[in-house]
Amino acid sequence: MTGMPMLEFAVTSAIDELLSLTAEEDEDCWWDLVWWLQGHGGRHALDAASRLSGHPEPSHRQAAADILCQLGAGPGRAPLDSPYRDEALALLLSMVEREHDPQVLNSITVGFGHLGDERCLASLSRLHTHPDVTVREGVVFGLLRRPEAAALDLLITLSSDSAPEVRYWATFGLGQQTEQDLPRLRDSLAARLADDDPDTLAEAVNGLALRGDERAMPALLAALELPARSHGVDLTTEALYAMAATTADPRLYPHLLAHRDDWLQNAPDEELPEELLAALARYATTGETG
C-alpha cells in the first residue's frame, strides 16, 4: 500500500473488511461499512464496485450492488442527486441482465428504487413474478414512488402476492407513496381489507382513509376499539384523522375527542397536531357530532 493516497487506502481496507463478512450474519457491520463507502468512498468506491459486479462469488456482487444503490448520497443529498448516479445505474442495469442469485437481485432492485429511473421498469416487470420472495420484495421497493402507469399496475398485482411481506410493501406503496387516486388503485386497497396480515390490513385502511373511501370505515372502527398501539404504530391515528376530515362521520367524533383529551393530558405544552385540528374543525362546520 506504499504511496497509496489515504482515501484510496481507506476504501480498499473497507472493501476488504466488507468482503470478509456475511451480510446476513454480520448485518450491522456490513451496513456500517456500506454506508461509509457510499458517503465517503467516491470514485474509488465506484471503481471497486465495478470490479466486484462481475465476480463469481454472489456476496461480492451483492456488496457491489449495495454500494452502488446510494453511492454519493449523504446528508442533504439524495441518491438522485449523486454525481455517480448515472454510472451506478448503468452498472446495476448491466448486472440485472445476467444475475440469478436472489439476494443479489434483491440488492439490485432495491438500488433501482433509490436511483429512480424509468429504464429500470422493464427489469422490475420481468422479475415481479420471480419464485423467490426475496426478489419480489426488492421489486416492490424498486417500484415505490414511480409515476408510470406500468409501475402502478405492477404494485397492484403485487398487493395480492402470496407472501405477506410483499403484500405489505405493495399496499404501503399504493396507499401512502403515491398521490394517485384511481378506481383500480382504490379497489386493490379495498381487496386487502380482508387480509389476514394485520400490517397489510392497516396500510389498506390508511390508504383508503386518506382518499375518503368509506369502504375502510368498518375496519377503521374495529381498529379504534382495540387497545392503544395494538393495531400498528400511528397508522390508525392517521386513518382516523384523514377519514374524519373527509367524511365528518359522527361515529368518528368521539374518537377524535378522546385523542384530543389524551393529547392535552399527556402533552399539555405541545400544540395539537394539525391533522387533528383539521378533523375537529370539519365537525364544527357540519355539526355532525352524533
Image (tube, rainbow, N blue to C red):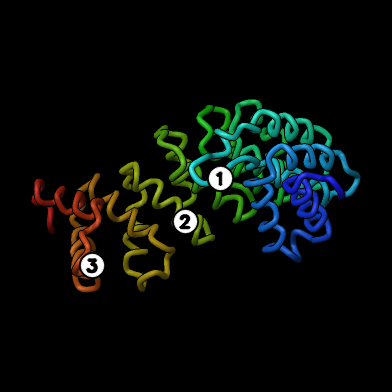
Q: Determine crowd level at label 2: few under 14, some 14-19, many 20+ residues with C-alpha closer than 10 A.
A: many
State which tag comes first along the sequence, 1 or 2.
Answer: 1
State which tag comes first along the sequence, 1 or 3.
Answer: 1
Mark 3: secondary structure: helix
Q: Determine crowd level at label 1: few under 14, some 14-19, many 20+ residues with C-alpha closer than 10 A.
A: some
Instruction: Where is residue 7? Give x, y as percent.
Output: 72, 46
- Using the image, determine if residue 244 lies above or below residue 43: below
Q: Label 3 belongs to which residue?
A: 263
The CA span between labels 1 and 2 is 34 Å
The CA span between labels 1 and 3 is 35 Å
Q: Determine crowd level at label 3: few under 14, some 14-19, many 20+ residues with C-alpha closer than 10 A.
A: some
Q: Label 1 belongs to which residue?
A: 74
Q: Which mark is residue 201?
A: 2
Q: Is residue 66 left or right of residue 194?
A: right
Seen from the viewer's position, the closer of residues 179 and 56 is 56
Q: Which mark is residue 124?
A: none
State which tag comes first along the sequence, 3 or 2.
Answer: 2
Q: Is residue 147 visible?
A: yes
Q: Is residue 104 visible?
A: no
Mark 2: secondary structure: helix
Please identify the quadrant where the C terminus is shown. Answer: bottom left
Q: Are marks 3 and 2 in contact (CB under 8 Å)?
A: no
Seen from the viewer's position, the closer of residues 168 and 162 is 168
Q: Amino acid at mark 2?
A: Leu
The CA span between labels 3 and 2 is 26 Å
Q: Amino acid at mark 3?
A: Trp
Instruction: Where is residue 141? Give x, y as percent.
Output: 60, 44
Seen from the viewer's position, the closer of residues 168 and 46 is 46
Query: Farthest residue toward the right?
Result: 56
